[in-house]
């Protein structure tokens, strides 16, 4: 199977992605598959770069160590670094309260504006001199998202046509309130949050069978934000997700057109299964709001990586459930679903509360819609209450306890379901 990976940006929260990807590799998620392309924006661009360099060298097993080394190095570990980190996070928090104006990086002298240190940090972990343009497509593709400040044009730096440098990565991560714009080949670039976060469309050129997305900004929020911090945080999340969900909707639309025969085999398109793994909002990050995305505290970054590893386990457990579910293998399903509670099936006229019977008989995955791994795992499904009944669209959510399914809930599709 051919897999493309896409890593959303989100500042220091993208340490979560490092934990996810490291655990995928450690668990052998790609041992029988080929990673054909990797994309990222901002902090996601750094994770994408580190994973890609290992893939480029034919050493995917090196990915966990490279990610860990970078994030350990990036953490504020010395007393001076901890002081600077506290000042930066505090300034962001005060700004989100509306008590201080945003930082203007052009008022900071260039030797002290952080760009040189960022480049040094990257160069400690990546030999950019060894990265030539891959015009012959000998390696997986790397795509980094940025935006041209003056024209508003989206820019996807592509390893097949662009030389990947420290400045390329800095351009993707140049948050305008922290860094001056980055100048590359006559272009003036800001953080890819304002364009593709992360780039998705370019990955389809490599004909992946599946697209695995690590999403940093939560899609949903349970309450209405009513504080200055909460409002600023939700604005940041919505802005960060806008381009991603537009691109994923386009992929799903093509998948549906292929499934119903509107697009044929000669259309140039192919079915791409989309899987999204999402970082859940934490209480600590919720208190600081968007300011927590600049937090480089050692314990904070380690906890994000730990949470990423745990979420990766749930993602892989969901994959293990899908295979016997799709093939209607009741014995394998029973081994996975013994004792699992079923709720909501009665809304479709299904009286069985047997999880195995539910998946083996009544419910099939809608492979044209994305799977979302968040607090629960969510699939769009087709429900057939009786053999001669027409399929009805539904939503199946599975709550996991560790790596084991605990509760299956079946519900109708509502207008707010993404």
Image (tube, rainbow, N blue to C red):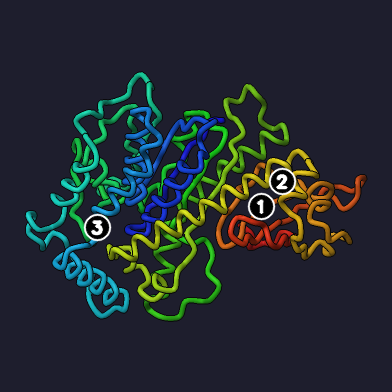
Do the numbered discs 2 and 1 sit on residues whose CB atoms are within 8 Å?
yes
Say few, some or many: other residues with alpha carbon within 10 Å of mark 3 (under 14 / 14 to 19 / 20 or more).
Answer: some
- In this rendering, the answer to whether 407 lies above or below 368 is below
Does 209 sit above or below residue 281? Answer: above
Contact check, label 3 and label 2, Cβ < 8 Å: no
Local SS, label 1: strand
Q: Which of the pair 327/265 is nearer the observer? A: 327
* Crowding near the residue tagged with mark 1, few <14, some 14–19, many ≥20 C-alpha atoms within 10 Å: many
- Residue 162 placement (x, y as % from top left): 28, 30
Residue in view at x 28 percent, y 49 percent: 70
In the picture, measured across the screen, residue 386 lies left or right of residue 320, that is: right
- SS of the residue at dot 3? loop
For mark 1, what is the residue? 379
Q: Which corner quadrant of the image does residue 286 belong to?
A: bottom left
Q: Say whether disc 3 or disc 1 marks the residue closer to the N-terminus.
A: 3
The C terminus lies in quadrant: bottom right
3 or 1: mark nearer the eye: 1
Quadrant hosting residue 415: bottom right
Judge depth for marks 3 and 2 and give the one in front.
2
Which labelled disc corresponds to residue 227? none
Q: Tell me the CA gap for discs 3 and 1.
A: 37 Å
Residue at screen point 19% across, 35% down: 185
Report how far apart the C-alphas of labels 3 and 2 lie in the structure. Answer: 42 Å
In percent of width and height, residue 352 lies at 87, 59
In the picture as drawn, the residue positioned furthest to the right comes out as 388
Residue 117 coordinates in the image, percent (x, y): 15, 52
Specify the label residue 176 is tagged with: 3
Return the residue at label 2. Answer: 365
């Amino acid at each position: 199977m051919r897999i493309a990976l896409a890593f959303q940006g989100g500042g220091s929260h993208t340490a979560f992605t490092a934990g996810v990807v490291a655990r995928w590799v450690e668990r052998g998620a790609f041992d029988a598959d080929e990673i054909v392309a990797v994309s990222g924006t901002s902090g996601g661009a750094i994770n994408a770069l580190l994973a890609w360099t290992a893939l480029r060298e034919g050493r995917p097993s090196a990915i966990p160590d490279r990610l860990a080394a970078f994030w350990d190095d990036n953490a504020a570990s010395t007393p001076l670094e901890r002081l600077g980190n506290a000042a930066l996070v505090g300034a962001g928090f005060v700004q989100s309260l509306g008590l201080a104006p945003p930082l203007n990086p052009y008022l900071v002298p260039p030797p002290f504006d952080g760009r040189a240190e960022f480049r040094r940090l990257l160069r400690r972990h990546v030999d950019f001199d060894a990265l030539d343009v891959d015009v012959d497509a000998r390696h997986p593709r790397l795509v980094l998202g940025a935006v041209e400040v003056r024209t508003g044009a989206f820019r996807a730096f592509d390893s097949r046509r662009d030389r990947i440098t420290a400045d390329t990565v800095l351009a993707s991560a140049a948050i305008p309130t922290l860094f001056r714009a980055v100048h590359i080949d006559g272009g003036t670039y800001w953080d890819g949050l304002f364009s593709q976060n992360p780039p998705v469309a370019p990955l389809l050129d490599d004909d992946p069978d599946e697209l695995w997305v690590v999403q940093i900004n939560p899609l949903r929020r349970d309450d209405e934000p009513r504080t200055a911090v909460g409002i600023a945080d939700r604005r940041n999340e919505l802005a960060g997700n806008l381009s991603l969900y537009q691109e994923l909707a386009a992929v799903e639309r093509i998948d549906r057109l292929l499934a119903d025969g509107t697009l044929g085999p000669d259309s140039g398109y192919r079915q791409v299964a989309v899987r999204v793994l999402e970082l859940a909002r934490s209480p600590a990050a919720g208190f600081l709001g968007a300011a927590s995305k600049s937090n480089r505290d050692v314990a904070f970054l380690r906890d994000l990586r730990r949470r990423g590893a745990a979420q990766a386990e749930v993602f892989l457990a969901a994959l293990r459930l899908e295979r016997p579910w799709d093939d209607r293998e009741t014995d394998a399903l029973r081994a996975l679903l013994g004792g699992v509670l079923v709720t909501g099936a009665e809304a479709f006229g299904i009286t069985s509360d047997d999880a195995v019977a539910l998946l083996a008989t009544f419910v099939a995955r809608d492979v044209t819609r994305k799977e979302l791994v968040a607090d629960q795992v969510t699939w769009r499904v087709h429900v057939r209450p009786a053999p001669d009944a027409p399929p009805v669209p539904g939503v199946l959510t599975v709550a996991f306890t560790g790596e084991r399914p605990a509760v299956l809930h079946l519900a109708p599709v509502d207008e707010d379901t993404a």
